Image (cartoon, helix red, strand yellow):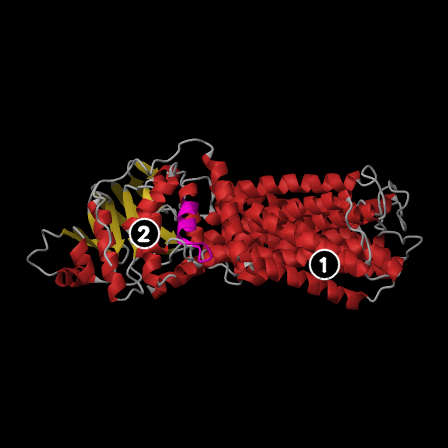
Amino acid sequence: MKSKPLALKILDAVAVILLLVAAYLAIFVAPTERVMGDVQRVFYFHVGTAWVALIGFVFTACLSVIYLVTRNLKWDRIQVAAVEVSVVFFLITIILGSIWARPAWNTWWTWDPRLTTAAITELIYIAYFMLRQGIDDPDRRARFGAVYALIGGLSAPITFFAIRLFRTIHPVVIAGTNAEAEGTFSMTADMRSAFFFALFAFTVIFIDLFWNRIRLGETQDIVEQLKLKVTM
Amino acid sequence: MITVKKLVKRFGLKAVLRGVDFDVQPGEFVALLGPNGAGKTTFLRILASLSRPSLGEVSIAGYKLPGEAAQVRARLGVVSHLPLLYGDLTAEENLRFYARMYGILDYETRITEVLDMVGLAPRRRDLVRTYSRGMQQRLAIGRAVLHDPDVMLFDEPYTGLDQDASSMLDDVLKTVAAQGRTVVMTSHDLARAEELATRFDILSRGVIAASATSRQLKRSNLLTFYKQALAG
Amino acid sequence: MTIKTSITNRVSKTAERSQSSGNFFRAVFAVFWKDVQAEYRSRELFSAMLVFSLLIIIIFNFALELDIKTRQSVTAGVLWATFAFAGTLGLNRSMAIEKDRGCLDGLLLAPVDRSAIYFGKVLSNLAFMLIVEAIVLPIYSVLYNVNLFQSGLLFVILLGSIGYTAVGTLLATMSIQTRTRDILLPILLFPVVIPVLLAAVKASGGFLEGESFSDLSSSINLLIGYDIIFIATSFMVFDSIVEE
């Protein structure tokens, strides 16, 4: 069994450092927002985690197609990693969104397009795992998972645009394009740099977690093989 | 008629068939014997095009599986231990359905012929739900010969049949074989197999352990042959 | 009782098969007709869906304790919630019949494109759903004194049902092959069918309040778009979920 490659170990360290720096920037360096006060700082993390979840989402949909075409189980393992990372990050995004919403708009939950679609996508991913759990044959498990992830991957964006047919109170952050959106704010240069740094940090975190999870999947497979050898 | 080379079938990491070589000439009646878990059903399902081989080559009536599966299916009749019949339809409605699925042109005539052959003509308008197990099995064979297949596969057809039903099934099988079809039948019942088959292949631990024609077995007993094959 | 053994030669003439491409449509129709026939005999699926729908409407009546005014605005929602829940019953049962007696194998053994099975099943599932809806609508109209027979509404119900059964049939085919079977279908289906419910409720409600086709064009377009996308996708992937 290979030990952790050096690149990954370095990435682990880099990811942690970036996270701490991003946190520092968000909490201490970025200026306080005029209207909402300090709670707005949650925004840097919220968008960061949403960003990660979204990358995971796009990856998942693409991986579905790749697996169904190549039928190579390695892509299935990678898809599971992508879905797992996505599931966790959608959850964090939703929780952070809630934390931000309460003081800012006096409600724990807003039924706006982004948050609602995030919740629905989360449920699709949970359904994905429940589907896989009920199947013993690895090949069938991979196929069914890929098909469902594909259906979900097509449905979620449609859901987002469908909900958008109604009004939103989700803050349109960069220069209000939607005049009806309440609670918008525009960003100063300092805020912008903290924001983009957070996005960058979270992208690195995504790659790190994703890679680690794939390695975990590979190790699991090796264990299964060894188990079989022992019982035979 | 049937050519199988180095067939391997894996479910995940577990190999059920490990390199099966199997050659059947037109008109042969092969009894495929073996202990439980040897892979007989898996093997038959692959021949029936219901399952894909992991490795190796399979061709039936000159057509390769899985690539030319549709052509194979047109020439294949399958009877398993499940009846594959719709309980809420009558016998003739069941046959009509399958006749349409197989694209048979003059199906009313053919249906009557087949019902006569399996001795179910007087009960053609009865719901299959009301049939005994033996009758369902006979109707299942009728369904399987409807499109006049060159090759027939029987997976444990005697399961759950009493003495009377079994001897009726014997007659039908003999008729089917006499019509010049190539037959592969799996069975646990050595005595029956000995009566009907022209050749005996033993599947053990995922490979064909032994093969002998009925002529070769004249002196020795099938049971002895079977036990020897399993031990070796 | 003797079995006739008079046929010693292969009777290839009567068993002659057609080689045309019409086989696909013949197979789709055969699957559809088989389901309709079987259901006509037993009426299991249909009666279960119908009774369940009526019970849901009654539950909503007590759960939502509405005055006449508010009731008008939730009619669309209550109807679609009812259809969505009752629909899973029909979908589950329809695919379970194939699985239980090994009939799915029988379908897979036929020398036709697997998608013919998909389309046949979608058509029969759709037919059952539409029949149930056709009975629920007048009953709801009577219970709540509201006229539900407007062409716009009926059109929306048709479009929505198509989208629902297109995805539902695909997912039901998967769920009956798992260990958890029936319970899994709603969990798989509801999150991905939300766009249909959204658009259908919006459009249904709109039509009931007298809005015109052009007012509701975005919802209707969404429904049509969804139907097309998911019928096409399901048709393409159906093969990979029935093979082994």
Residue visible at 55% across and 41% down in the picture: C235
Could you say which quadrant of the image residue A41 lies in? bottom right
Q: Which residue is denoted by mark 1 in the rendering?
A: A92
- State the residue lying farthest toward the front: B122
Task: Give the left or right position of residue C219, taking residue A222 as reference.
Answer: right
Q: Which residue is denoted by mark 2 in the rendering?
A: B141
Q: Amino acid at mark 1?
A: Ile
Counting from the top left corner in percent of width and height, residue C223 is at: 71, 42
Task: Give the left or right position of residue B212, taking residue A189 as reference.
Answer: left
Instruction: Give the chain of mark 2.
Output: B
Counting from the top left corner in percent of width and height, residue C30 is at: 48, 44
Element type at marker 1?
Answer: helix
Of residues A24 and C197, which is closer to you in this image?
C197
The numbered dot on residue C233 is none
Determine if the magenta segment contains residue B197: no
- From mark 1 to mark 2, how far is it between C-alphas? 59 Å
Of residues B76 and A73, which is closer to you in this image?
B76
Q: Which residues are magenta?
A: B86-98
Element type at marker 2?
Answer: helix
Task: Give the left or right position of residue A225, taking residue B167 as reference.
Answer: right
Determine if the magenta segment contains residue B88: yes
